[in-house]
Amino acid sequence: MARRDVRAVVGPEAFLSPSPSIRRRTEMMVHVAIAERRTITVNSLMKYLLAAVSGATAILLFSLADQGVLAMAARYAGDRPTLIRFMRDMGHPKIGEWCGEFAASVIMRAGGSPPADAAVASNWRGYGTPDATPHVGDVAVADRGVPTGETGSHVGFVTDVDLKNGTFTLESGNAGNIYTTRKISCFSFRTPPSNVLSALIGNGVPPRTALVAR
């Protein structure tokens, strides 16, 4: 430490006397002052670091929450054990032709109630309200000439719309790929209740339906 720094700590009078005891006291005061300054500097740096980490974590959590249930479910689709656990926890296990069970699990996670016998895709024609033009978050049900209540249809969710080409992107289970491109003319569309739609597309996931860790 330079002499001018020592004087700043203990004062210039400490250098006026050649007494050994005063010198020893001065050295001790200098060491204590240096240690305190180092501690203050480290603590300040730690506070800034923790603040930065907390901020980044908050941004990350906000980003994940803002993606909505549809994005969450799509991530689960890439991990079979997680997908199976998710659907089981929502009360609609992954069994057989499971597009209906997947749709029901997503709706449950969004805080809604799926239609009766939701495992049968055609039964989703009675869910929500009709939508003549598909919008993101709508439930999409394949026509295929299948009467309501009969098996053989397919159900999922609209995640993108291309009106120019008459197609939309469907997120669904039991389709080989979580996302597939479908013709608008081959499907009917149903808009979920507003609170459910909000959770599906990313404006808030109801905490009461949080997944139970298993």
Image: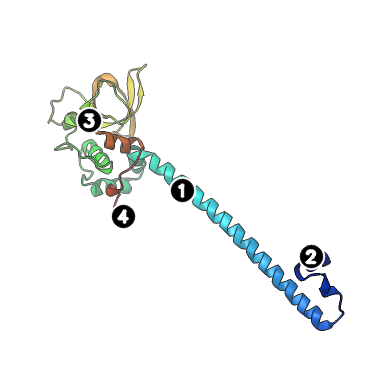
Give the residue type that dot 2 points to.
Answer: Asp
Read off the residue under disc 4: 213
Graded by Cα atoms within 10 Å as few (under 14), some (14 to 19) or many (20 or more), the crowding at tag 3 reads many
Q: CA distance from mark 2 to mark 4?
A: 58 Å
Please name which of the two marks, 2 or 4, marks the residue nearer to the observer: 2
Give the residue type that dot 4 points to.
Answer: Ala
Q: CA distance from mark 2 to mark 1?
A: 42 Å
Q: Residue at x 85, y 74 (%)?
A: 15
Give the mark, 4 or 3, whose residue is nearer the N terminus. Answer: 3
- Give the x, y percent position of residue 162: 36, 21
Give the residue type that dot 3 points to.
Answer: His
- In this view, 151 is above or below 94: above
Please name which of the two marks, 2 or 3, marks the residue nearer to the observer: 2
Q: CA distance from mark 4 to mark 1?
A: 22 Å
Q: Dividing the picture into quarters, in which one does residue 196 lie?
A: top left
Q: Is residue 211 left or right of residue 32?
A: left
Q: Is residue 108 left or right of residue 58?
A: left
Q: Residue at x 21, y 31 (%)?
A: 128
Read off the residue under disc 3: 154
Read off the residue under disc 2: 5
Give the mark, 2 or 1, whose residue is nearer the N terminus. Answer: 2
**Circles 4 and 3: CB atoms closer than 8 Å:** no
Q: Dividing the picture into quarters, in which one does residue 71 lie?
A: top left
Q: CA distance from mark 1 to mark 3?
A: 38 Å
Q: Dividing the picture into quarters, in which one does residue 190 lie?
A: top left
Give the mark, 1 or 3, whose residue is nearer the N terminus. Answer: 1
**Circles 2 and 1: CB atoms closer than 8 Å:** no
Q: Residue at x 34, y 43 (%)?
A: 76
- Give the x, y percent position of residue 122: 17, 30
* Disc assigned to residue 58: 1
Position of the C terminus by quadrant: bottom left
